[in-house]
Amino acid sequence: MEIDKKYMKRALQLARLGEGLVSPNPMVGAVIVSSDGKIIGEGYHHRYGGPHAEVCAIRSVKESDQNLLKDSTIYVTLEPCSHYGKTPPCAKLIIDTGIPRVVVGSADPFPEVSGRGIRMLRDAGVEVMENVLRDECDALNVRFLTAHRLGRPWIQLKWAQSADGFMAGIDNDGQPYPVKFSTPVSSIWMHRRRSMVDAIMVGKNTLEIDKPRLDCRHWPGHAPRRVEPQHNLEQQMHELYKEGVTSLMVEGGPTLLQSFIDLGLYDDVKIEIAEKKLETGLPAPKFNS
């Protein structure tokens, strides 16, 4: 078991290389190890629509090591797929390649897979060990797993505020005005977080007051799709999931953020608290007691 954990850790390292590039697909890494403990193949999912990790790992095996595959183990952070999508089934490729043992980190809740990949492997006589470093593998793809388990995107609420709890200032006419709370380092961190979600939600007031660009110019990766809130947020979340959105960052004003909090409609919260105080202004959202 310790040996299996060792190689699964390597698969996790590889999987993270796809961060910000593969969504709405999950990040996946794969390592092929021969019976004498030698790594003969490695791969990860590089980009959405590209070859899966298992394919990349198998393709990386040198011709001189091909004969070792029949006695090897492939370590995969997520259950191999069993359906024809943008690529053929990875479970079938493993079977056809002759690899006799597969070690899996997370089960795939995607309806087209959901245990079918493991069942296909076992029906073909492949030995499968499940749930190796499952917590780490689940954490890696918490957005993907949450979306397919709940039928809505994984939702992160994010805002910046003053040390005394205000998100914006208020002028003499009672109108809010933007205040810069972020630092150069925190801005880079936020752009990285944006690159990891499929969509970002802001309300009209935030667009008018802050005029945010909502891109990832300080971090490599794709800019999230911008969506505006609708009257029924819960229904909108299910509709976004049907459209293929598996993760959403809510970066709006206090009214929109408070709506998500009141509904209990969030999975993660990031609050940047600046050192400066405003003494008065637009209050930040509050959590239900």
Image (cartoon, rainbow, N blue to C red):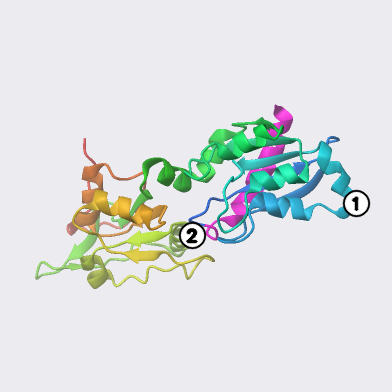
Assign a secondary structure to mark 2. helix
Left or right of 78, for residue 5: right
Q: Name the residue under label 2.
A: 192
Task: Answer left or right for 47 relative to 191.
Answer: right
Q: Mark 1 points at which residue?
A: 64
Q: Element under label 1?
A: helix
Res. 51 image quadrant:
bottom right
Query: Horizontal and vertical percent for residue 127?
Result: 71, 31
Residue at figure coordinates x 62%, y 32% from the top left: 132
Is residue 62 covered in magenta?
Answer: no
* The stretch drawn in magenta includes residue 17: yes
Which part of the image, by quadrant, shows the C terminus? top left
Taken as a whole, is the magenta stretch helix, strand or loop?
helix
Q: What stretch is highlighted in magenta?
A: 1-22
Q: Residue at x 74, y 31 (%)?
A: 3
Res 94 seen here: yes
